[in-house]
Amino acid sequence: MGDKRKPGVKRVRLTGARFDGGRLPVDSLVELQKYQDVVRIAAVAEWRRENPDMELPSDLRNSVSLTIERIDEGSADVFLAFEQNQVYVHYQSEAQDAADAIIVAAYSGAPIPELPALSLQEDSDFREAVSQIGLTLGPSQSIEFYPDSPDANPVSITVETRKLAVDQLSRIEDFLVHTDPVPATNGLQATEESLVGRVTILDADDQKFTIVIADGSQVHGWYRQTPELLEDFREVVNSTEVGPLTRISGTLQSKGGKPFRFKEVSSIQRVQFDDTAWGARLSEFASLPPGWEDGGGEQITSIALDASQMLLRAVDHAQIERPGVFPTEEGGVLVEWADPARVRSVEVLPDATFELFSLLRTQSTGEHAVTKDLTVAIAFVEAEKA
């Protein structure tokens, strides 16, 4: 069958004489069942975190189901895949990531990640299910669990390592258990927003992507696979070094005030600026996420950036002394000249309105005007040369 594997496949390898030749004893199937239980409980947590005021769908748990895609020879090298249910594919993928993170933490001694949307009973069931993975193992046997990819370094579950993991999972202080299943402070806040960065990963099978934003953090997301969106993604996906700057707009979920993931994508747009010092500066502004100024600061709008670029082209064309160029907390751009004699500025507001201001140092009040007309703003800028 070769080594070609479908995206999203989970590798679980059982080693020891009992599993030689690819044999999988019937009582070892409980190991795979427990992993499925863990993913199902995590899917419930993911759904509740995103839908705090809605009743859990009755078919959610059973719809998150794994199937044995194949067993390779040697030891029992098992490859699991989801029985795809398009309604819940979003929660399947997120639940698997969450479940894998907790298994890795349990076997590495790291703090156990929280699933705060779980009830007290669900939290207990979840820890119990994770603890029981490896229950059927005997001496000289192991389960190699591959959390990231079939070729990544595995977590090794043995009789010895399982004892440490069970102790780690049973320490109640590692868990934030809530009687209220939806604590407001830890929930996801969803708003219609944009992020600018570089798309580095595209998984067309699972309709997932990853964008790396200005601070180097990764934001994952899902999209509904339409021919237009898929083609737009394929045109921009590349490395962080050479990929084009891209603005992704849609339903963005934030956690703790920081971008967490895109629940849905409405548009994808390349962000292109002139190959000048101004272009590089505006690219930096475009990459600023919401809250860039000590938790405050709106995203710089596309139309404000476009208007600023046209204004700065006029600056270069007229060979005017270079101004200072700054982002504003309101989501606009400030272009400013300041010297000992006077201050002169154009503030491009988020809606691309231009606020023109001039003040001589000898004056107590300056001249102020507002215009939507780019030519008026350019004339104001060109007067700087006079």
Image (cartoon, grey):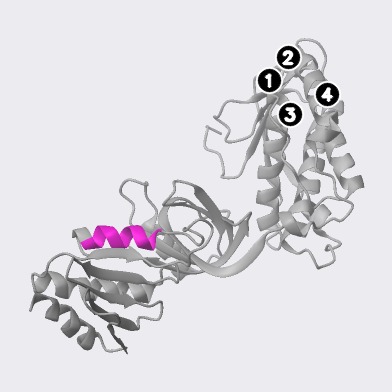
> Can residue 59 be seen at all in this image of the molecule?
yes
Is 140 drawn above or below residue 103 in the view shown? above
Residue that carries the numbered disc 4 in the rendered image = 167
Residue span colored magenta: 278-287
| Cα gap from disc 3 to disc 1, whole angstroms | 24 Å
Residue 118 spot, x, y in % from top left: 83, 50
Q: Is residue 283 magenta?
A: yes
| Amino acid type of the residue tagged 3 in the rendering | Ala
Say which quarter of the image contains residue 365. Answer: bottom left
Label ID, residue 106: 3
Residue 25 visible in the displayed image: no
Q: Which residue is mark 1?
A: 75
**Is 30 drawn above or below residue 245 in the view shown?**
above
Label 2 vs 1, first from the N-terminus: 2
Q: Is residue 5 left or right of residue 239?
A: right
Mark whose residue sits in front, 2 or 3:
3
Residues at marks 4 and 2, CA–CA distance in whole angstroms: 25 Å
Q: Amino acid at mark 1?
A: Ser
Residue 308 lies left or right of residue 49; in this view the side is: left
Of 330 and 269, nearer the camera is 330
- Quick one: SS at disc 2? loop
Element under label 4?
Answer: helix
N-term mark: 3 or 1: 1
Mark 3 touches mark 1? (CB < 8 Å): no
The residue lying toward the viewer, choosing from 335 and 309, is 335
Q: What is the x, y in percent for residue 258? A: 57, 55
Residue type marked 4: Asp
Instruction: Identify the residue position indicated by label 2 in the image.
Output: 16
Q: Which mark is residue 164?
A: none
Residue at 11 percent across and 70 percent down: it is 320
